[in-house]
Image (tube, rainbow, N blue to C red):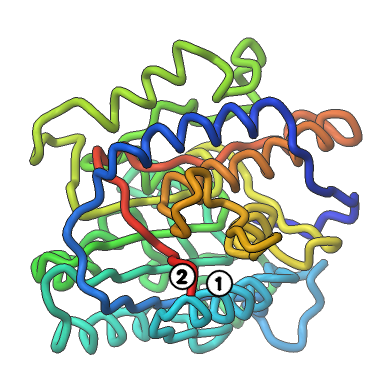
Amino acid sequence: MKANMAKKCGYSQNLMFIAVLLIVALLGACDPWPQTSSKKTALLYGVTIYRPLVSQGTSPNLAWPVNDVDGMESMLGGFGWDVTARRDSQASKSQLAADIANLASTVQSGERILFYWSGHGGEISRPGQGLDCWILPYGSYNPANFSFDLVWDEMINTSELAELFRPLQEKNVNLIFILDSCNSGGFVNNQTYVSPLPDNFSQNPDLGEPLNDKTLLFDSLSHYFSGPAGNSTQQPNVWVFASSGPSEEAWENQDYEHGVVTNWILRAGQNTNGKLNADANFDNRITIQELFAFATAGNEFWNEQTANLLANDYQYYPHLSGNSLDIVLFSKP
């Protein structure tokens, strides 16, 4: 789950960031983007208040997911996305199913559909069904009980999320998932999605800075350039960007007024001296690999600061699906 952190963090252009940008520039130079239409639609879901009129300290309420949705709505709208935003009580499982059904009735092949989630997530064992990773839309907590009782039918696990979006996938659209919640890497590392990063960054002290580790780096690159289309670990038209590993917590920060990873995603789309911040190869576009590289570098600064000021348990690392293709998310107006 996510928690409100008071320690201030900022921006750092460290060596890892520079290395990542060089890597992504090389990837971008290959221009491996799939065919897309100009139409692009975003569904943004965020839950700050799970239980109205109850303080954060005595309930699962959060601080900044609605801010996350507000920021993403503004940024994506500025890049020409058609945005539907659902906040708090609107951001339910049933509403998501309705929004997907509505899109499926009109969507055409090649369109880009982005689903963004900010709120609680978890790696949780459901009685009789074993351990799985979940996102927790509005209604996931029992409103009649002030403990953390879960309402399983209102939650969404890995297979249920795939099933919810199946009507869109069958229309051959390009599906992009950005999940900013605890344990969201479980939606990368299941069946059709793979990630070379460890499930829990904090429990791998020998790893060092992940994208400076040559073995890990080339493992990551191999996922982009190997494997036949249709392989069980390849999904040509699905990308998953998760803020944390399957066994990691994700955090929000009161100085950012956003989730930590969402903060860097929003900065990625900002314009500095005529250039989009995450545009590594200066082509006036940001692909998902460029976005991941930029946000990962920002999150690495968070890791460094929390390791120094708090504890390694606050460290975590974004994950990206092992798709062999890149896709453009934002183009400079």
Q: Is residue 49 left or right of residue 331?
A: right
Tag 1, which secondary structure? loop
Tell me where residue 121 appears, x and y as whole percent.
53, 57
Q: Residues within 10 Å of mark 1 (few under 14, many from 20)?
A: many
User: What's the CA distance linking mark 2 and mark 1?
Assistant: 6 Å
151 left or right of 309 in image: left
Q: Quadrant of the N terminus?
A: bottom right
Identify which residue is drawn at 20% across, 35% down: 233
Q: Is residue 244 left or right of residue 307?
A: left
Q: Which residue is mark 2?
A: 151
Q: Are marks 2 and 1 in contact (CB under 8 Å)?
A: yes
Q: Residue at x 11, y 71 (%)?
A: 109
Position of residue 6 measured from the top left corner of the image (x, y, whole percent): 89, 55
Q: Which is more toward the observer, 333 or 1?
A: 333
**Whether residue 123 can be seen here:** no
Tell which of 289 and 299 is nearer to you. Answer: 289
Q: Secondary structure at mark 2?
A: loop
Q: Looking at the picture, how far across and down is residue 317, in whole percent?
A: 59, 37
The residue that appears at 41% across and 53% down in the rendered structure is 287
First-in-chain label (2 vs 1) = 1
The dot on residue 141 is: 1
Residue type beneath disc 2? Val
Residue at the image point whose x is 24% and y is 59% from the top: 162
- Residue 218 vs 150, above or below: the answer is above
Residue 99 spot, x, y in % from top left:
31, 85
